[in-house]
Amino acid sequence: MSGQIVVGVDGSEEARLATHWAAWEARLRGAKLELVSAWELPASAYGYGLGDALIPSELAQDVAKVSEDHLRAALEDVRTEAADAHVEARAVEGQAAQVLLEASKVADLLVVGSRGRGSVRELLLGSVSQACARHATCPVVIVRHLTREAGAGPVKEAPSGRMSRKEAGMKVLYTAEAVVEGGRAGHGQTTDGRLGVELSVPEELGGQGGGGTNPEQLFALGYAACFQSTLLSLARGRNLDASDSAIKARVGIGPSGHGGFGLTVALDLHAPHLTRADAEALVAGAHERCPYSIATRGNVAVTLTVDGRERERSAA
């Protein structure tokens, strides 16, 4: 274990990106990661200056619960991104900047999103990046959308778009390398020699068929493997029994209708030990987190099903 990284959590997109960045950085450093969610009631909740007597206890409990729910979601993300990371999480009552500055006094790095948004989120971790940048006693990383204006001050910025690790300071942990000769009717092999395949063009695509595989089959295998790995990680985090489960992936190719060819993907989960509600929730969660789903989002239509029954259809 080497050092400690503190990251602010509030349920906003910026905080989620900050958590992803911090998780990868903690994994690379071998550091402990602490997720901190700050919450406080707005001044208007205290009535006309008459103090705590006018505050319904249910309101404070509700705001605290929202903070705890954000922490649980962030913990799931971290366990998906870096399952072996040492992670702690806590919700603290108090002004967000003050809470994070206090937590970072013993940290080697403080990571925050650029701003909070939304009515409930404003009660939690608001726009605190500037205060952290000016007053933190450790280095600060501010993760923001590229379209937003950079904050001032001596801050290392980790600019990011939605789930783009290349833009968010992606740290490449593994790179696969393969060489193909002859295109779809040729031969492919990984440069480490672990995999070599003959390629054939299916008759449906105007080829002669043959005994070789094709890019769509290889993509189906890769997507299914990555998707199920993500799903199993989520299941463990929720104490759900996803043993004996399987993902069937179908990858289609054909004219897109507006020039060129496009792909479609269908992912079907069979999980004999899960209720349908739990299975559908895991499929939806895995689709949000799986690197293949993230990489193809906006370009490939994906159908998600559980035992052949469709749950949703979206642009992946």
Image (cartoon, grey):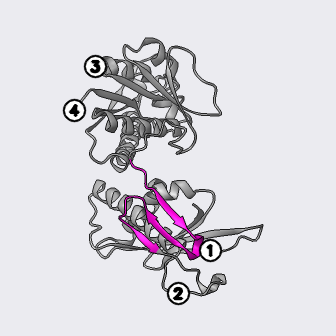
Say whether disc 3 or disc 2 marks the residue closer to the N-terminus.
3
In the rendered image, is residue 40 in sight? no
Q: Amino acid at mark 4?
A: Met
Picture residue at 42% right of the left edge, 37% below the top = 19
Residue 306, x across and y down, in percent: 44, 74
Mark 3 to mark 4 CA distance (whole Å): 15 Å
Picture residue at 47% right of the left edge, 60% below the top = 178
Label 3, residues with CA under 10 Å away: few <14, some 14-19, many ≥20: some
Q: Which mark is residue 210?
A: 2
Picture residue at 49% right of the left edge, 78% below the top = 213
Judge depth for marks 1 and 3 and give the one in front.
1
Q: Kindly indicate the quadrant of the structure image that contains residue 144.
A: top right
SS state under label 4: loop
Judge depth for marks 3 and 2 and give the one in front.
2
Q: Amino acid at mark 1?
A: Ile
Label 2, residues with CA under 10 Å away: few <14, some 14-19, many ≥20: few
Q: Amino acid at mark 2?
A: Gly
